[in-house]
């Protein structure tokens, strides 16, 4: 009976050692990244403001492109309507 309780104690010690090694490896893996001090990091509001500025610029570009594309399509439609109404020999 004494030998089986000794085995249980040894198994518990080995299991505890394995757990400590695994936890230490996991912590070391998390610490490998670079940490930027809080003083040099921009605040969350600054990031949000920069993001919103970029989004607004993208929206302005998109609106301009849509405006130009719409104008081109309207001109094409007007030209087609004009060409459909007039005989081809009067356009020359």
Image (spheres, grey):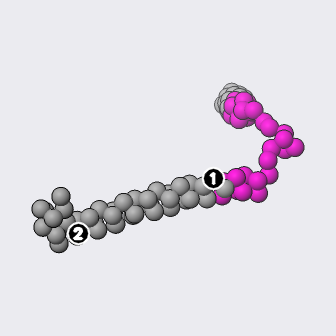
The residue located at (69%, 31%) in the rendering is 29
Question: Which residue is pictured at 18% across the width and 58% down the height?
Answer: 92
Residue at coordinates 19% horizontally, 66% vertically from top-left? Answer: 83
Q: Nearer the viewer, mark 2 or mark 1?
A: 2
Q: Is residue 56 left or right of residue 69?
A: right
Q: Residue at x 12, y 67 (%)?
A: 87
User: Which of 4 and 84 lies nearest the eye of the viewer?
Assistant: 84
Q: Position of residue 17 (x, y in %)?
A: 72, 29
Decide which of tag 2 and tag 1 comes sooner along the chain. 1
Q: Quadrant of the N terminus?
A: top right
- SS label for mark 1: helix
Compute the Cα span from label 2 to label 1.
42 Å
Check residue 41 for magenta coloring.
Answer: yes
Residue 76, horizontal then vertical, whole percent:
29, 62
Q: Is residue 9 above or below residue 90?
A: above
Q: Nearer the viewer, residue 89 or 59?
A: 89
Percent position of residue 33, x then y:
72, 32
Give the left or right position of residue 34, taking residue 79 as reference. right
For the residue pair 28 and 22, the one nearer the viewer reads as 28
Q: Which region of the structure is painted magenta?
A: 23-52
- The number of numbered badges drawn on the structure is 2
The dot on residue 46 is none
On screen, residue 79 above or below 19: below
For disc 1, the neighbor class at 10 Å (few under 14, some 14 to 19, many from 20) is: few
Left or right: where 61 falls relative to 83: right
Examine the image and state in which quarter residue 16 appears.
top right
Q: Which residue is mark 1?
A: 54
Q: Secondary structure at mark 2?
A: helix
Q: Categorize mark 2 by other alpha carbons within 10 Å: few (<14), some (14-19), many (20+).
A: few
Q: Which residue is mark 2?
A: 82
| The stretch drawn in magenta includes residue 83 | no
Q: Quadrant of residue 69?
A: bottom left
């Amino acid at each position: 009976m004494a030998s089986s309780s000794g085995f249980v104690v040894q198994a518990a010690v080995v299991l505890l050692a394995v757990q400590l090694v695994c936890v230490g490896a996991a912590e070391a893996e998390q610490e490998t990244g670079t940490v930027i001090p809080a003083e040099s990091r921009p605040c969350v509001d600054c990031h949000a403001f920069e993001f919103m500025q970029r989004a607004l610029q993208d929206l302005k570009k998109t609106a301009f492109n849509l405006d130009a594309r719409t104008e081109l399509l309207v001109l094409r439609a007007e030209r087609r309507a004009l060409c459909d109404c007039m005989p081809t020999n009067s356009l020359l």
